[in-house]
Image (cartoon, grey):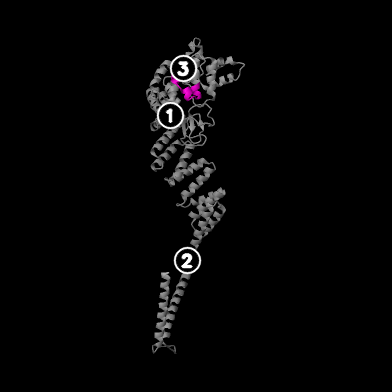
């Protein structure tokens, strides 16, 4: 309001000043005489002032026309001028408007409209690094992979957009299932931009799927250097990769190198049971029994596992059950209350035919944590103590319907694996397998996957007692695995031949 009033006052004062000036000039006597080419003109003071104003204005217009003429000539010649800059600004404005409309169309799920706007923007802007990317994304959304790949290839020609082109083609190959080509492209992309977290993860995933363990370890180290992976996570995953590399080397027959890799994996992650078991067995084969025992004890203290017990038994495969029970005591005392320690102790006592001790070792597991292995061991204890066939059959029937206990379960998709693997066979996730009880209702939870259901069966302790089988008929038919329970289930369901169970169980055990 105040500004408007000020402008009005200034305008009125200006008009008043002009009026006063004109009145003053009209009252002055004399004038200006102009003679030119035989023409003479006499101007009053007011006319002279007006003439000067008109002359100045005419000169200004003439200069502007001359400048415009020069600009037009330069424009025609291709030189940059104010005129060309004006048209450039106008074209740039239209181009960015088209680019904005294209991005909005892409975000709105209208890929065809986005491609049209991208083409229009390219016409005005001449900025392929912007418009090609919009076109490629719109083509992908529209399902035109051929068009998208063509645009991405154009991006490869410019250093500033080469990474975007490589990554775009890589994602296309991934979607098409061409993982080997995608892996090669991911390696090129990571060379162009090592700090890109998405490409790092993609490359690591593709390398683990392709079992390129050495390359995966390099990528993992790169992630650590770039600060995209915590050090503790790096140690764990590098141990998994080292173990996988050791298995691959062992398959090629390079025992020494495989042992080094397995020991390195165990050093980085002491709770990685497969690494400890593999390293221990390699040490046993090389006659390094004491080192193997020390390594197994260290891992058992972190994570008791049946595979470790089997490896510990393999240190002295020919020893008798009593000696084995004594040798296992230092190992079992490391984690005496762990269910695995209690189960192994019970199995060892069964092999030594000390069934009361086996029952004591089981304790309350039959009531508190009754899985198929616990119930099978309990059936063996009751058979050894002279229980009737009905009692033994009842225990084995319970074992068939009971949970199978801890197994190798993928933490991502809950798929159950018979053996540990670095990559889940179902969802392809890396380092997600852990030894745990499968969630209720998990498919495959009823399948026995552990290779050491009963320790005596693995080491062959019972079979070594064949010379006293006639004196101990009950021990001869001790059910050692859940496979025997399946035989009993078939017998229990057939009421016509209930007395054939012991003979079938004995025959089944003899075949093993």
Question: Tag 3 or tag 2, which sits nearer the N-term?
Answer: 2
Q: Is residue 3 above or below residue 347?
A: below
Which mark is in front, 2 or 3?
3
SS type, badge 3: helix
Q: Is residue 9 above or below residue 418?
A: below
Which mark is in front, 1 or 3?
3
Q: Is residue 38 above or below residue 479?
A: below
In the displayed structure, does residue 139 sit left or right of residue 233? Answer: right
Q: Which mark is residue 284?
A: none
Q: Which residue is mark 1?
A: 273
Q: Quadrant of residue 60?
A: bottom left
What residue is at 50 percent from the left and 62 percent from the top?
A: 91
Quarter occupied by the N terminus? bottom left
Q: Which residue is mark 2?
A: 86
Residue 243, given in percent of the width and then of the height, sits at 43, 32
Residue 298, given in percent of the width and then of the height, sits at 38, 27
Q: Is residue 373 magenta?
A: yes
The residue lying furthest to the front in this view is 1
Q: Is residue 396 magenta?
A: no
Residue interval drawn in magenta: 346-375
- Mark 2, Cα crowd under 10 Å, few <14 / some 14-19 / many 20+, is few
Alpha-carbon distance for marks 2 and 3? 97 Å
Q: Which mark is residue 350?
A: 3
Question: Tag 2 or tag 1, which sits nearer the N-term?
Answer: 2
Helix, strand or loop: magenta stretch? helix
Q: Quadrant of residue 177?
A: top right
């Amino acid at each position: 309001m105040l500004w408007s009033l000020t402008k009005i006052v200034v305008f009125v004062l200006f008009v008043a000043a002009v009026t006063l000036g004109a009145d003053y000039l009209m009252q002055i006597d004399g004038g200006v005489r102009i003679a030119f080419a035989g023409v003479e003109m006499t101007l009053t003071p007011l006319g002279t002032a007006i003439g000067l104003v008109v002359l100045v204005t005419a000169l200004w217009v003439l200069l502007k026309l001359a400048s415009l003429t020069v600009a037009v000539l330069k424009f025609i010649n291709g030189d940059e001028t104010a005129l060309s800059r004006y048209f450039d600004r106008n074209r740039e404005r239209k181009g960015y408007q088209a680019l904005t409309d294209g991005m909005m169309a892409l975000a709105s799920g209208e890929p065809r409209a986005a491609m049209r706007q991208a083409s229009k923007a390219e016409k005005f802007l001449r900025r392929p690094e912007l418009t090609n990317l919009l076109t490629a994304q719109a083509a992908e959304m529209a399902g035109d992979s051929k068009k998208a790949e063509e645009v991405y290839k154009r991006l490869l020609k410019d250093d500033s957009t080469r990474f975007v082109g490589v990554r775009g083609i890589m994602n296309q190959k991934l979607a098409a299932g061409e993982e080997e080509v995608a892996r090669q492209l991911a390696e090129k992309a990571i060379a162009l931009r090592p700090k890109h977290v998405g490409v790092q993860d993609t490359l690591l995933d593709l390398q683990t799927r392709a079992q390129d363990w050495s390359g995966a370890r390099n990528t993992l180290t790169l992630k650590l250097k770039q600060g995209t992976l915590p050090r503790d996570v790096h140690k764990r995953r590098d141990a998994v990769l080292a173990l996988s590399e050791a298995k691959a080397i062992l398959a090629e027959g390079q025992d020494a190198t495989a042992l080094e890799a397995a020991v390195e994996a165990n050093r980085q992650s002491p709770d990685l049971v497969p690494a400890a078991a593999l390293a221990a067995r390699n040490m046993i084969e090389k006659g390094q029994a004491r080192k193997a025992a020390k390594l197994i004890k260290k891992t058992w203290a972190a994570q008791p596992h049946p595979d470790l017990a089997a490896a510990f038994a393999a240190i002295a495969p020919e020893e008798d059950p009593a000696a084995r029970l004594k040798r296992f005591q230092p190992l079992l005392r490391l984690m005496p209350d762990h269910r695995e320690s209690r189960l192994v102790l019970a199995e060892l006592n069964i092999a030594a035919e000390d069934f009361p001790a086996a029952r004591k070792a089981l304790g309350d597991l039959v009531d508190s944590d009754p899985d198929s292995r616990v119930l099978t061991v309990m059936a063996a204890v009751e058979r050894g103590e002279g229980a009737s066939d009905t009692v033994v059959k009842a225990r084995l029937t319970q074992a068939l319907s009971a949970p199978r206990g801890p197994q190798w379960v993928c933490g991502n998709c809950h798929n159950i694996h018979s053996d540990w693997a670095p990559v889940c066979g179902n969802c392809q996730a890396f380092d997600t397998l852990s030894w745990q009880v499968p969630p209720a209702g998990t498919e495959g939870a009823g399948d026995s996957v552990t290779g050491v259901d009963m320790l005596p069966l693995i080491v062959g302790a019972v079979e070594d007692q064949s010379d006293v089988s006639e004196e101990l008929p009950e021990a001869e038919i001790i059910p050692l695995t859940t496979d025997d329970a399946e035989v009993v289930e078939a017998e229990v369901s057939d009421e016509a031949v209930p007395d054939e169970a012991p003979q079938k169980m004995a025959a089944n055990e003899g075949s093993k």
